[in-house]
Image: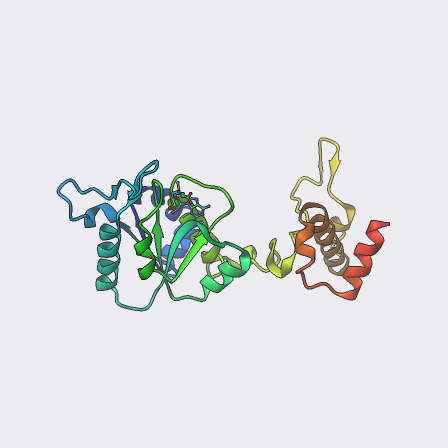
Amino acid sequence: MRIDVLTLFPQMFDSVMGSSILSRAVQNGLIEFHVHNIREYSDSKHKNTDDYPFGGGAGMVMMAQPIFDCMEAVFKEDATYAKRVLMSPRGRLLTQDIAGEYAKETRLVIVCGHYEGVDERVSVILDDEISIGDYVVTGGELPAMVLIDCVSRLIPGVLGSSESAKDESFTGGLLEYPQYTRPAQFRGLNVPEVLLNGNHAKISDWRRKQALLKTKKCRPDLLAKASLTAEDMLFLEQAEE
Ligand SMILES: C[S@@+](CC[C@H](N)C(=O)[O-])C[C@H]1O[C@@H](n2cnc3c(N)ncnc32)[C@H](O)[C@@H]1O
């Protein structure tokens, strides 16, 4: 997948794209990452990228011109189709399902807003708006990194076989079961016996039940949409008693 990011703060992406799984995905050629500084495309003398909002009000608004020109330059560099998305608190709320939808794209162009947001006319060059949650952060850079990270780990080959996304929280609609690692005893806290006996059928059954209990306790709203078997439902009913 090719990912182009349009931002006023390109350096913010260095550490995230240069570390861990994302850096490995770039090195292995599974992700091609390009970051573009919107400021370089401003046609004003002082390279301004924002201005006062028409109608008054607090703060500054990112101007349409530098974003339009930056977008055009990105497609001059590579004309292949891309899904163009603005990071925005009013966008579709990012979920694992949406991440899966995005992971099927071959190219993403992500626009990061800043200040009070972007001139509304930018929407004519966009296909989607994504929010990372019902709260406001300073700029679209952190939300873009969240989107890039959760989408990338669903691209085949990005996670190693030992890091599969298949059992993770939200995949299949449930939260993940509790995980433990060595030592088996730590400060009087013991790892559940079932995980130590090597009986894979029992471990799998325990994990499913724990995932059901965790989801019921922490995110009961997810249970309504999860795909549950008759056995799962019976277990949850009995757990209530
Ligand atoms: C300070 S915010 C602007 C908030 C805007 N004035 C509002 O009330 O909706 C600046 C930029 O940060 C990004 N941003 C802030 N919160 C976000 C969220 N929850 N999800 C995605 N992007 C967000 C957007 O790109 C936004 O244009």
Residue 56 vertical placement versus 32 (above, below): above
Q: Residue at x 45, y 66 (%)?
A: 104
Residue at the outermost front position: 55
The tally of labels here is: 0
Q: Residue at x 70, y 53 (%)?
A: 211
Where does residue 218 sit, x and y in percent of width and height? 68, 46
Residue at the outermost left position: 45
- Going by the image, does 223 lie left or right of 122? right
Residue at the outermost right position: 241
Ligand 1: quadrant of the figure:
top left
Note whether residue 67 is visible: yes
| Front residue (pair 29, 113) | 113
Where does residue 84 sit, x and y in percent of width and height? 36, 60
| Front residue (pair 51, 22) | 51
Residue 212 vertical placement versus 127 (above, below): above
Note whether residue 156 is visible: no
Where does residue 186 sit, x and y in percent of width and height? 70, 34
Q: How is the image coloured?
A: rainbow
Where does residue 93 sit, x and y in percent of width and height? 51, 53
Residue 1 vertical placement versus 5 (above, below): below
- Going by the image, does 76 lie left or right of 175? left
Locate the N terminus by quadrant. Answer: bottom left
Q: Residue at x 24, y 54 (%)?
A: 70
Residue at the outermost bottom position: 80
Q: Residue at x 77, y 50 (%)?
A: 194
